[in-house]
Amino acid sequence: LFEERLHACPVDERVALALVAAEPELSACCFDPTAEVIRAVLENPRAGSVHARLIATHHRTAAGLDALGARTALTNDGGVRRALLQNPLLPPALFRRLWSPRRLLEQYLLTASHESPEQTRAMARDLLRTTFNQRTGEERAELILTTEGRCLATLVGLTLDSHATVILCRR
């Protein structure tokens, strides 16, 4: 529908349509490569998690993905989050905002994920290294014990505090 009818329309017309569209035009607007149309889709009161997943999967501009990331209610959806992680154009700032509050184990699992592009795995490695020293000793020890030490290759050069060391020595 987007390729056959909507793509030929001027951008202003597509933005106006996206603001008031209903199905199936609303879903078709999610395939638009223009960030302004994506913002309009997200402002449409009929837009929901299905549309957010389509945008996260198919949109190819950082501005459009940032507009999606600004909607916390939509980014809390697991399908939207998964689709964003698989999008090769995921902006680093959006990635950090979504994943820095997550537990260290979740961050590590993302570094080893085969479903995500290499760029996303690299951002996950950087985030893991950054947040490792900011977390409690219990969480650091949990990461090392749960991964049976496999995470240590990613954490070379980082230090363990005395609390994490005591927990590891007890085990």
Image: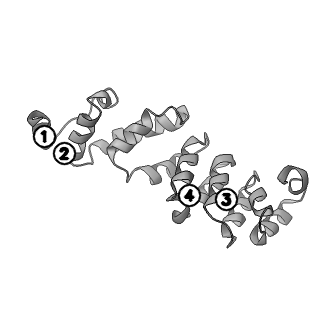
Q: Earlier in the sequence, mark 4 or mark 2?
A: 4
Is the residue under label 4 in contact with that under label 1 (CB below 8 Å)?
A: no
Q: Earlier in the sequence, mark 1 or mark 3?
A: 3
Numbered label attached to residue 167: 1
Is residue 149 placed above or below 3 in the rendered structure? above
Q: Earlier in the sequence, mark 4 or mark 3?
A: 3
Picture quarter with the C terminus = top left
Of the residues shown, which amino acid type is indicated by label 3? His
Is the residue under label 2 in contact with that under label 1 (CB below 8 Å)?
A: yes
Residue found 67% across the figure and 59% down from its top: 51
Is residue 70 placed above or below 169 in the rendered structure? below
Q: Earlier in the sequence, mark 2 or mark 3?
A: 3
| Closer mark to the observer between disc 2 and disc 3 | 3
Residue found 90% across the figure and 51% down from its top: 4
Residue 159 location, x and y as percent? Answer: 21, 35
Residue 134 location, x and y as percent? Answer: 27, 48
Residue 152 location, x and y as percent? Answer: 29, 29
Numbered label attached to residue 68: none
Residue 164 location, x and y as percent? Answer: 16, 41
Numbered label attached to residue 137: 2
Residue under numbered circle 4: 69
The secondary element bearing badge 3 is classed as helix
Splitting the image into 4 quarters, where does residue 127 fall?
A: top left
Of the residues shown, which amino acid type is indicated by label 4? Gly
Q: Earlier in the sequence, mark 1 or mark 4?
A: 4
The secondary element bearing badge 2 is classed as helix
Is the residue under label 3 in contact with that under label 2 (CB below 8 Å)?
A: no
Q: CA distance from mark 1 to mark 3?
A: 45 Å
